[in-house]
Amino acid sequence: MAFQLEDIQATKTVSETSENKSPSILKKEINWFNKPFANKIKEDFYTELSVLLNAGVNLKNSLELLGKSQKKKRNKETLIAIANDIVSGKSLSEAIEKHKSFTEYEYYSLKIGEETGTLARVSEQLGHFFARKNEQRRNLVGALTYPAIILSTAVLVVVFMLQFVVPMFQDIFKQQQVELPSITKFIISVSEFVKHYGWFILLMLLGLFLSRFLLKKKQWFKQTKDSLMMRIPFIGDFIKTVYLSQFTQAVTLLTASKVPMVNSIQLVKQMIDFYPLKTALETVEQSILTGNSLSSSLSQHKLFSDKMVAMVKVAEETNQTEFIFDRLNSQYNIQVQQRSKLLSTVMEPFIIVIVGILVGVILIAMYLPMFKLSSVLG
């Protein structure tokens, strides 16, 4: 084999030490707040880079052409800086290493492509990787946007009724001195609680939302968040499918570059920022190092389905790892698309039913004393 991943890791460790850079910065999978080289930019960058390299354009000129095509100044400056590093004698992987917008997964993938002479192919595969990742993100956002709007509207309606409608009925009941049913007393107590502590609750929810951005780098916060998300019915299974799709696609890319399976697991573990999968891959890596096969190592975790384990076992027996993982990735992509549509379809009527029940309970609680009052007056 033309490369040794251990040598690559040793080189990167020395470089990080000399530059005082924390490797955790490079492990970020998703860039927020319009940071340079978001996943959509990376999709276009790697796809266009592979086209230029396959057309015979050298790396320096390719980067300069791509830099000129960038609309945002920060992206353009990043590509110009990378091109200048190429001119000074650095490789592409070394040039992107100091830019925090690029992950370790990209660094290692490009380094392997350079060592094996398949940089154009690796760039094309990275373009496909980010294309599918962006598509999965769009599916997830599309599936949750409309239900989120409905849920927000429903919460506002219920709060409005508790804040303004219920007190109106409460005044009438006090004036008429009507004996209130238990359900009416409960709704009135909820209304008074919202009336006195509504702003406090709103500020607390806003604080929790903002604290997410402050705590997102904390390991315990990631573990808690991912564990809770996995427990949500249907949504947890959908999120698991999204990350398994990313896992199988990454393994397909690395096996196509002839990376040993242990090293592939190590790289994918660094790239995927999903605690249940990362933890599972850590134990899978240790199991493989003790002499177990990949299929038997995967079978020890419920996160990996029996179907995946069976197909991986077939891949090991037939030496078709790249083909099998590519097929698994296609199947998971189809599942992500189907479940994203189903998620939107199921959540919409479910939220409407919940809202209908809440509004109905409030109305019934308010009108029961009115019926009693009308019978007394009659």
Image: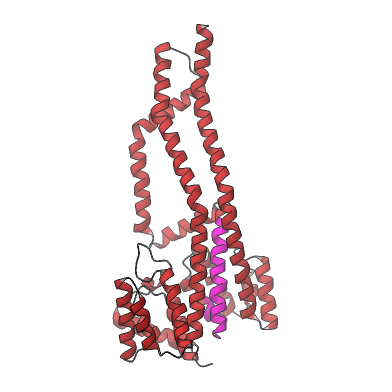
Residue occupying image coordinates x 37% and y 51%? 209
Number of numbered markers: 0
Residue 302 visible in the current orientation: no
Colouring mode (rainbow / by chain / secondary structure / one colour): secondary structure
Q: Would residue 123 appear left or right of 315 to someone viewing this image?
A: left
Which picture quadrant has residue 212? bottom left
Q: Is residue 130 above or below residue 170?
A: below
Identify the image quadrant of the N terminus: bottom right
Q: Position of residue 156 (x, y in %)?
A: 42, 38
Tell me which segment is drawn in magenta. 236-265
Q: Is residue 51 left or right of residue 335?
A: left
Q: Is residue 265 above or below residue 222?
A: below
Q: Residue at x 56, y 68 (%)?
A: 245
Residue at left offset 33%, top offset 85%? 83
Residue 262, magenta (yes or no): yes
Instruction: Give 88 or 288, whichever is nearer the viewer.
Output: 88
In front of the other: 354 or 348: 348
Task: Please name the predominant secondary structure of the magenta segment in the image.
Answer: helix
Decide if residue 265 is on the left or right side of residue 30: right
> Is any atom of residue 222 visible in this view?
yes
Q: What x and y, as percent, mark residue 278?
A: 51, 68
Q: Is residue 296 above or below residue 240?
A: below
User: Relative to the observer, which residue lies in front, 18 or 236?
Assistant: 236
Across and down, in percent, residue 215 comes to: 36, 58
User: Residue 349's quadrant in the figure?
Assistant: top right
Please report the residue visible at 45 percent of the width from the left and 89 percent of the height from the top.
114
Tell whether position 311 is magenta. Answer: no
Residue 307 in the image: above or below residue 82: above
State the residue lying farthest toward the top. 378
- Give the percent coordinates (x, y) of residue 89: 33, 92
